[in-house]
Amino acid sequence: MDLFRKGAFKGKTVFVAGGSTGINLGIAERFGEMGANVAVISRNEERIAVAAERVKATGADAIGVVADVRDFDAVSRAFAATTEKWGEINVVISGAAGNFLSPATGLSANAFRTVVEIDLLGTFNVLRASFDHLRKPGASVISITAGQAKRPVMFQAHASAAKAGINNLTGTLAMEWGPAGIRVNAISPGPIGDTEGMARLAPSDEATAKLKSRLALRDYGTKRDIADAALFLSSDNARYITGVVLEVDGGLLLGDASADALTLPDRR
């Protein structure tokens, strides 16, 4: 059963940062399917033009704006362009991210700083710049975080630190902005099969099978799973939910659920 009827977000405006590829583009397209006006921003001009056309293909009114989330003034201009076209904004998705695998001893200070600036500083810039443009009360702000914010992962010191900051920022802004009627939440995706990231992390059938065997639900998620979580958190159905990091991960953070991880007690 689909919780959302077509057109449920008609007349509402959604701003998606990092919306040119992957999970974030999937979110932008899903809001478009639901009738929203959608602005997508990215620092890559070619990708953002393609992304805007894909959102328009859903039947939505959409624009693409070139902006680097690390540049607060550029992000502010993107919000201004969005409100100039459609008025105040109902939903903000902050999902721009940078990541790669590296042991901490292999990370330069510049590499660490770059990921933190894209993920954490970028999230702050998007959320802070959004405040004056939000339709309050009733606005929904959602950041995209990751499981390593809660559970340390080897070779992810940079991303783990940045995502942990996003989780904490989510709670802080939920408290500060709640009185204005703004709900602030985050979504933490697990392994999402139809993404470039998973293609790199599990490039072979053997690696894919091994990872799936560790998940409680024994399968990857999809971009649609994350997009529907964003729809829910932005809907009136979630009107009393704020400060939450919603794990959409098939049970990943529960731990290793494979048969190999099961050790039965000796009952002799």
Image (spheres, grey):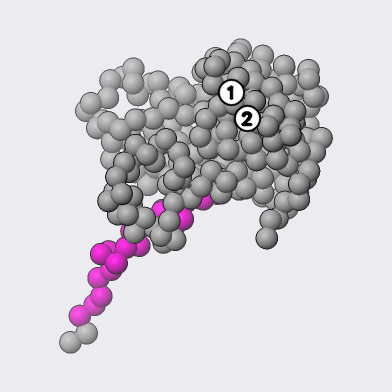
Residue 169 in percent (x, y) is at: 54, 35
Q: Label 2's element?
A: helix
* Extreme residue in the front direction: 57
Q: Is residue 203 visible?
A: yes
Q: CA distance from mark 1 to mark 2?
A: 6 Å
Q: Is residue 110 magenta?
A: no
Residue 33: give its label: none
Q: What residue is pinned by disc 2?
A: 54
Magenta-highlighted residues: 245-266
Check if mark 1's residue and mark 2's residue have beta carbons within 8 Å: yes
Q: Assign the N terminus to one quadrant of the image.
A: bottom right
Q: Label 1's element?
A: helix
> Looking at the picture, which amino acid does disc 1 mark?
Val
**Relative depth, front residue between 121 and 63:** 63
| Left or right for 60, reference 146 | right
| Left or right for 217, reference 261 | right
Q: How many marks?
A: 2
Q: What residue is pinned by disc 1?
A: 50
Name which residue lies at 58% across and 38% down: 26
Q: Residues within 10 Å of mark 1 (few under 14, many from 20)?
A: some
Name which residue lies at 23% across and 26% down: 106
Q: Quadrant of residue 157?
A: top left
